[in-house]
Amino acid sequence: QDIVGLITKTEGNPFFVKMREGAEAKAKELGLELRTFAGDFDGDNESQIAAIESLIAAGAKGFAIVPSDSSAIVPTIQQARDAGLLVIVLDTPLDPMDAADATFATDNRQAGRLIGQWAAGTLGDKAADAKIAFLDLATNQPTVDYLRDQGFMEGFGIDVKDPNKYGDEDDARICGHEVTAGSEEGGVTAMETLLQRCPDINVVYAINEPAAAGGYQALQAAGVENVLIVAVDGGCPGVQNVKDGIIGATAQQYPLDMASLAMEAIAKFAKDGTKPEVDPKLGFYDTGARLVTDKPVAGVESIDTAEGAKLCWG
Amino acid sequence: MSEPVLEARGLTKRYGRVVALDNADFDLRENEILGVIGDNGAGKSTLIKALCGAVVPDGGEIRLGGKTVSFRSPLEARLAGIETVYQDLALSPALSIADNMFLGRELRKPGIMGSVFRGLDRTKMQKIAREKLSELGLMTIQNINQAVETLSGGQRQGVAVARAAAFGSRVVIMDEPTAALGVKESRRVLELMLDVKRRGLPIVLISHNMPHVFEVADRIHIHRLGKRIAVINPRDFSMSDAVAIMTGAMKPPAGVEA
Amino acid sequence: MSEPVLEARGLTKRYGRVVALDNADFDLRENEILGVIGDNGAGKSTLIKALCGAVVPDGGEIRLGGKTVSFRSPLEARLAGIETVYQDLALSPALSIADNMFLGRELRKPGIMGSVFRGLDRTKMQKIAREKLSELGLMTIQNINQAVETLSGGQRQGVAVARAAAFGSRVVIMDEPTAALGVKESRRVLELMLDVKRRGLPIVLISHNMPHVFEVADRIHIHRLGKRIAVINPRDFSMSDAVAIMTGAMKPPAGVEA
Amino acid sequence: MSDDATGSATAERGLGNASHGVASFDEDAPSPLRRIQQFFHQNPTAIPAIILIVAVVIFAFVTGGKFFGALNLSLILAQVTLIALLGTAQTLVIITAGIDLSVGAIMVLSSIIMGKLAVDYQVPVVLAFPIGLLTGLLCGLANGILVTALKLPPFIVTLGTWSIYGALITLVSNAATIRSQALDQFAPFLKSMGARIPVGGGAFLMYGSILMIAVAALVWYMLSRTAFGRHVYAIGDDSNAARLSGIQVNHTLVGVYAIAGLLCGIAGWVLIGRVGAVSPLGNQTANLDAITAVVIGGTSLFGGRGSIVGTLFGALIVGVFDSGLSLTGVDPLWRQLTVGALIIIAVAIDQWIRRVSA
Amino acid sequence: MSDDATGSATAERGLGNASHGVASFDEDAPSPLRRIQQFFHQNPTAIPAIILIVAVVIFAFVTGGKFFGALNLSLILAQVTLIALLGTAQTLVIITAGIDLSVGAIMVLSSIIMGKLAVDYQVPVVLAFPIGLLTGLLCGLANGILVTALKLPPFIVTLGTWSIYGALITLVSNAATIRSQALDQFAPFLKSMGARIPVGGGAFLMYGSILMIAVAALVWYMLSRTAFGRHVYAIGDDSNAARLSGIQVNHTLVGVYAIAGLLCGIAGWVLIGRVGAVSPLGNQTANLDAITAVVIGGTSLFGGRGSIVGTLFGALIVGVFDSGLSLTGVDPLWRQLTVGALIIIAVAIDQWIRRVSA
Ligand SMILES: Nc1ncnc2c1ncn2[C@@H]1O[C@H](COP(=O)(O)OP(=O)(O)OP(=O)(O)O)[C@@H](O)[C@H]1O
Ligand SMILES: Nc1ncnc2c1ncn2[C@@H]1O[C@H](COP(=O)(O)OP(=O)(O)OP(=O)(O)O)[C@@H](O)[C@H]1O
Ligand SMILES: [Mg+2]
Ligand SMILES: [Mg+2]
């Protein structure tokens, strides 16, 4: 039996739990022996290095990894590739992207753009004097954090200045950025803080749906109505929240697809040595991000929550 | 000879490779002050710790009022009426004098506040503590709520002694109660001991101060190398003989040999 | 009257609202044993701590061999030749006897191992420690590398006393060196003190044990309420008079009043 | 008495008319600074209170009054509620000279058990809720038993159980969030602590904050007015002396850890209300925040000294700094830096004041 | 001598021919269990060694020998290198009865200063490298000065500086990683500690591991063979006694924190080699891992006792468990749970053995 690996960022996040379930099912179907690893926290590079080393030592054929530190893991991935392993990066591309054999990911900037365009479209003329709160991930701005944030701004029509960094913009519509660690608790506190700075907030961008749910909770508690909340992820509770009108729209990702595609690619590589193809323009295989909303906006492609619920994870 | 109140036979206690108690015997009679003397490390403190539940002996038997007892904690010994002043005092520095006196036997408020809410009756405890301290004439404490750590060494010793004297109902044990005390303070503790004796309680006094022991003790238990080697009457022996027996310079004469 | 070796004038030290030293004077002469007596809390320990740099006095002057000194740490006093046995011993329990004896004055290996690599000459330190301990006839230590915490209270006191006696070059101060000791052990410490005196070093002995003080002291400094109230010659005064002066029962007679 | 027992007797003849007065010294007027120091020394909980007031005043100026908004003050109280609850649990443990690194994990685990039972298994909330609290109690009990029965250092025990409870969180929850709507449907009671009572002027009081204050008052009563509380202090002070004084040290310690666990369970309930959902994410820093609140509140990590009131002030101080800095528009990064510095400064002032003999 | 000083003199007449023998007791044969306990009591570092050996043997069986692969053993050594280095720094501090929560942050900060200077500002590596180490030293020095000059508890000081150094990491690095290629171009020296020397059979030795062992040996020498080391133990044992014995407590403490900082700087260098890049992320759990290694290695959190060798074993134990469990194919979640339990068990065994009077 060929050994394959799956290395995720953490253990506790439903996104990675789903990814692992997808990989497990696929590996079983293909007759592969799957070894799974995870870091202790988001950003735990050391554990991922150790995981790659044990996979090399175990003689694995290849592995899929969601990198915690997309540039610092590159030298270790190079080692694995030098040792003949097929390395497929999931969800968060490496920096540089071609350091992996293939990348199966959502285009996070595009996902951000989708919700930005949708928000701008929904507001219409009022977009010109919107007040936007940003519920971001962490103070050190990891890749997904700035990609989604800046994508949203692009979609919404805000000058992003440095496209790889948020916080340097001078658009008056931006109320402020607060970090949430991607959790409900963080979302509540961050929203409370931002509400004090601008009580007239009417658009909320959230890094993911838990942070959005927390933000909603804080808005509700403060009695602030009619706020447009957008997020990225597309987990089942998130889609449900879109359906319930809590979140206006979310950009859905497909972690199950990423994982099972990766397992198939490694199985193929183990059999005949062929490496997966990637979109030459994007530089990675886009597993797609679809906008889920029940209030479609002209010019922004979207699916409704019923369909979103069928495709959702976690 | 009256029946012993507290009696022990064949106590042994081992700390790793050190045998602190080696088949030791002990007898305390009604209404007496029993002096216990012995070299440093002879096992005196270990002996009384075994008697009051602070260490569980490896072997041997302890009888209180004729009944075999086996204390697994100082609390049990205390409930049986044995109060002890430990060599290292056993006070909680950050707690007040009153708190320390009632530690582990706090009084609760009467009525529902005490039974349901388990509230402490602090006024009553402070009153009793003040009474006990002044009744024993031991010292003039200005503030019964002062933390024990703010007291001088002598005053602390006083609190420990007063606690034991106030609450002992069967036996009071004092392990070197005057070691850190000045002349005046030592005198008060000796007077207190005679006072407690007058109240009918037997006392065990461990001390390196021979004049003190010879002054107040009715009988003297001499401890050597982990066991009792003699019990003498201070009226029959001179201090120098007691020291000679204690240090092994002289064989205990027949009749007093334990 | 010889010139004082160590002398202090008008020392004061305040702990919050407690005045531990209240304008206290002190004189130690060449080649004498000076007894210091006083009630608990009179300020004796604070006085000698001020003399050996362990506390910095709020005011007053200290002169060593006629020169004004002001020690900001025990190390400075030690470098000036003053060695102290503290009431609470000041040993490091987990370190060995030899380590404790040389703590803060370790010997380094000769040559490059010592000067560059700063290696300790453990063999030599152990040898000297063993020599000092047996030269002083104080005890038969089986293993000089034993941790101090495995020693009995008496043995620990012995190590502290031996350390001070071995390294003091100007003055040796002992704060209640026999408080925890048995009769035999106390005797050895007293002998050791006379021995140190024969070697020409003056000694300060603080003790609550009047017979001990009267036995070895050449002069007795009586401390009361934070200051020296008298200096007496033990040959001219009885113990009871000294105690009376010390406790305030008797006014210090003219001539000895400090 | 033997004929030669004369030594002490003769020495003590001098005691005949010894003065029995207590030593008294004349005290000259202390400097004003010294006097302030003395005041605080006698009223230790006043220190964090003063630091808090000074911080509030400064921020009120810097933010041009915005800080003093009724809403802002209400928010600060709501935001510190969880840390204050965990801090209360932590204070109990730290007074015994222990430490509990697992408080955050116990809180989240309890909230998940409640929510999961009520929503996914549709257990009636009258059962699910107490089972959730019981989970907290049992987790604390396990800590206490390991600490006393195996005589392990609390740091190690709770480091280990932190890992274990953390893994249980993921296992039990399957890393899935229980949504607000699902709670509304099956167990709105679990969300009740997040509700707010308006008190006028935009200010509000969260039910959870009221519960927190009630719990803190109860624990304060327990610590300062019951025998159990005296025993807790005595154990932290000197556990050997406490044992010799007849205190059942192990029983008391197990009790302390179990109560701390129960308080974490209660915090789990408040967490659900505050977040509006049951989520396995987050609260990784809750332990450290709680310990910080306790220490700023003047409780000694070496045990025996400390108070619940101090911890509440400690939590408020951190909350006020966080909120004040964010209102002045300080970037989260600089906020992190400033809060770090402020912790050190707050404790430095505290230490200076306590050092009465300085 | 005054005429009435007779008490003690008469009592001591009896001393004339006192026996001068040392007390001796007959010792009956101890049980084998007791004998094992006694052996370990006299050789405390043997305990983690034995635990380690037992763990290795068990894993070798369970994984069918795979665990014993030369490559696998090499990997474990490489993987524990950083924790062992930080643990060495932490051991120094913990022996003084302190704690340093900022070790992980200092390590990352030092690595960023080196990398940033060498790559972004193109400072020659002969300058950038020592400046990076100096950063570590200065961070440690700051900790030490705060602990001694302000007399603050080390827990608070390093909690605060952890926050501060953490913020500095983000500020200095601008949250950007310095890539492997850039290092290769401007400062390959910074990556050198990650290079591996093959030692046959697939096994290898990372340069960083050799450096770690050399550093640990040096610190071991310092602790056990120099006066400074004796003073460090004495301070942790009883800092007041140490001061009275003439030790310059504050100087020594500042030295300890500064050396710990320098060791973290060295760890930062190894970190660059191990990762192959300079990254501001990560190492949030490095503190806790290092403390865990120290405690499993038998160093007391209350100070005065402990050894570097123990810490190395402690780090290896955690590494072996982690690797062994992952080789047996245990799911990461269960692994977290098991490691938590194993920490408790390892320390429990250790405690049992140390309790010689049990
Ligand atoms: N907890 C302990 N662990 C190990 N050894 C101990 C312990 N307690 C006492 N010992 C040893 O047991 C022996 C007897 O000690 P013990 O304290 O009973 O002597 P003692 O007669 O009270 O002496 P002293 O007059 O100095 O108080 C000593 O050798 C001592 O070192
Ligand atoms: N560190 C301290 N902090 C506060 N008060 C202190 C401190 N050290 C001593 N004192 C107080 O100073 C006074 C003098 O104490 P000191 O120890 O000098 O007395 P002493 O004469 O040595 O008494 P003893 O015979 O009991 O040893 C006492 O009232 C004591 O409580
Ligand atoms: Mg004793
Ligand atoms: Mg004294």
Image (tube, coloured by chain):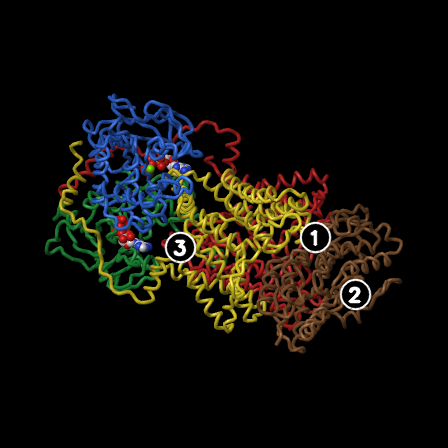
Chain colours: A brown, B green, C blue, D red, E yellow
x%, y% of residue E13? 14, 42
Residue type, label 1: Gln
Q: Nearer the viewer, residue E235 or B206?
A: E235
- Which subunit holds the residue at mark 3? B
Tags 2 and 3 on a common chain: no
Quarter of the render that holds ligand 2:
top left
Q: Which residue is mark 3?
A: B104
Q: Is residue D204 visible?
A: yes
Image quadrant in which the C terminus of chain C is located: top left
Q: Which residue is mark 1?
A: A141
Q: Which residue is mark 2?
A: A279
Residue type, label 3: Gly
Q: Nearer the viewer, residue E350 or D181?
A: E350
Q: Secondary structure at mark 1?
A: loop
In the rendered structure, which disc, 1 or 2, sits on the residue that comes first in sequence? 1
**Would residue A94 be found to the left or right of residue C197 on screen?**
right
Residue type, label 2: Asp
The total of numbered circles placed on residues is 3
Mark 1 and 2 residues: CB-CB less than 8 Å, in contact? Answer: no
Q: Nearer the viewer, mark 1 or mark 2?
A: 2
Q: Is residue C256 above or below residue E349?
A: above
